[in-house]
Image (cartoon, helix red, strand yellow):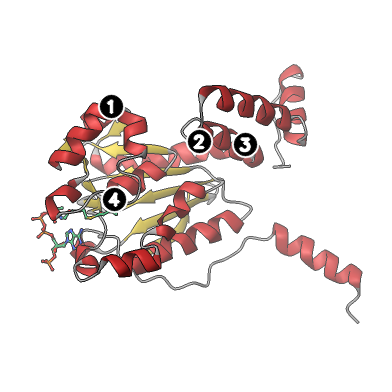
Amino acid sequence: MITTRHLKCLYIVSKQMRLLSTTAYTHINVGVKGEKQNIGYIQLNRPKALNALCDGLMHEVSKAMDEFEADSQIGAIVLTGSEKAFAAGADIKEMVDKSFKDCFTTNFLSHWDRVSRSLKPVIAAVNGYALGGGCELALMCDIVYAGDNAKFGQPEILIGTIPGAGGTQRLAKVIGKSRTMEMVLTGQQITAQDAANWGIVSKVFPTDKVVEEAIKLGERISKNSKIINAICKESVNNAYETTLKQGLATEKRLFHSTFATNDRSEGMKAFTEKRAANFKDE
Ligand code: CAA
């Protein structure tokens, strides 16, 4: 007979167990990477369309993000495309016949923000084109690594529209008004090096090394406490959404909140005892 105690045990075991995906993906490849297989890996995979972000692809990215967030072993997520294209933007062929009413009544693109809401650190590994929605998707990630062949741009103006997933907002916060205006009003593409100089990208690597480096970075971040990583992310993201005064006050409270975790206690004890911290993510 199954008792409440059995159910409780089952719950605890299933919480600790790895959630192995049974989802079949069409437009993306999903897996785990890294020595400890603790890095979630999402590769956009519509090569014939330069990874144009069709609706189905963006739903799959959301689904994969949900799965990685629910998997207690995953410490960070790497999002990448191919060597030719991270993503060439929203799928223009899917948009061409849409009316204002279609967009407005379905709140078109509203589900695109899943990556920006991740509690786990997300690293974009960008090679080739990151244009329109592709550039915006990279900007939703926490850290962007680029291959030296990467090209960033917001070319929507050239097809009679404007960026609709953060290209006039996140980009402006990162690179400032004048550079954003120039990019969105001309549709010009910028190089990986310019993107690094302007703060879109944190590091540039040879094309064939960028994914590997992003995974290594994910592994390094995953050694920290997952709960403290999430609190830290929340505080940095807050800097983009509020005033300095409010941001500093929230940071202070979030800092205080780390003192409610065992990992904060373990981290500081480990320092005083001159040993490595053993974080339990609690
Ligand atoms: N949507 C749909 N299909 C796309 C696409 C897109 N955004 N970008 C490329 N493709 C398709 C092309 O139509 C082509 O398909 P076919 O072989 O069936 O014709 C295939 O990918 C290869 O593309 P090209 O032949 O154009 O390749 P290229 O090397 O000559 O040029 C490129 C590459 C400069 C990236 C060019 O494809 C291009 O300009 N793409 C569109 C970029 C763009 O405007 N992006 C913004 C989209 S709007 C948006 O993203 C809104 C938002 O804010 C969310």
Under circle 3, the secondary element is helix
Q: Pick the quarter of the image with the N terminus.
A: bottom right
Q: Position of residue 272 (x, y in %)?
A: 75, 17
Q: CA distance from mark 1 to mark 4?
A: 18 Å
Q: Marks 3 and 4: in contact by CB < 8 Å?
A: no
Q: Earlier in the sequence, mark 2 or mark 3?
A: 3
Q: CA distance from mark 3 to mark 1?
A: 26 Å
Q: Could you tell me the amino acid type at mark 1? A: Trp
Indicate which quadrant contains ligand 1: bottom left
Q: CA distance from mark 2 to mark 3?
A: 10 Å
Packing grade of label 2 (10 A; few <14, some 14-19, many >=20) is: some
Residue at mark 3: 231
Residue 137 visible in the shown view = yes
Q: Marks 3 and 2: in contact by CB < 8 Å?
A: no
Under circle 4, the secondary element is helix
Q: Could you tell me the amino acid type at mark 4? A: Gly
Q: Nearer the viewer, residue 245 or 203?
A: 245
Q: Earlier in the sequence, mark 4 or mark 3?
A: 4
Q: Earlier in the sequence, mark 3 or mark 1?
A: 1
46 to the left or right of 108: left
Q: Could you tell me the amino acid type at mark 3? A: Ile
Report the disc number at residue 134.
4
Residue at mark 2: 237
276 to the left or right of 235: right
Q: Earlier in the sequence, mark 4 or mark 2?
A: 4
Q: Find the residue positioned furthest to the front.
A: 101
Q: Determine if the C-beta at disc 4 is less than 8 A from ligand 1.
A: yes
User: What residue appears at the point 61 percent right and 63 percent down from the top-left corner?
Assistant: 19
Under circle 2, the secondary element is helix
269 to the left or right of 222: right
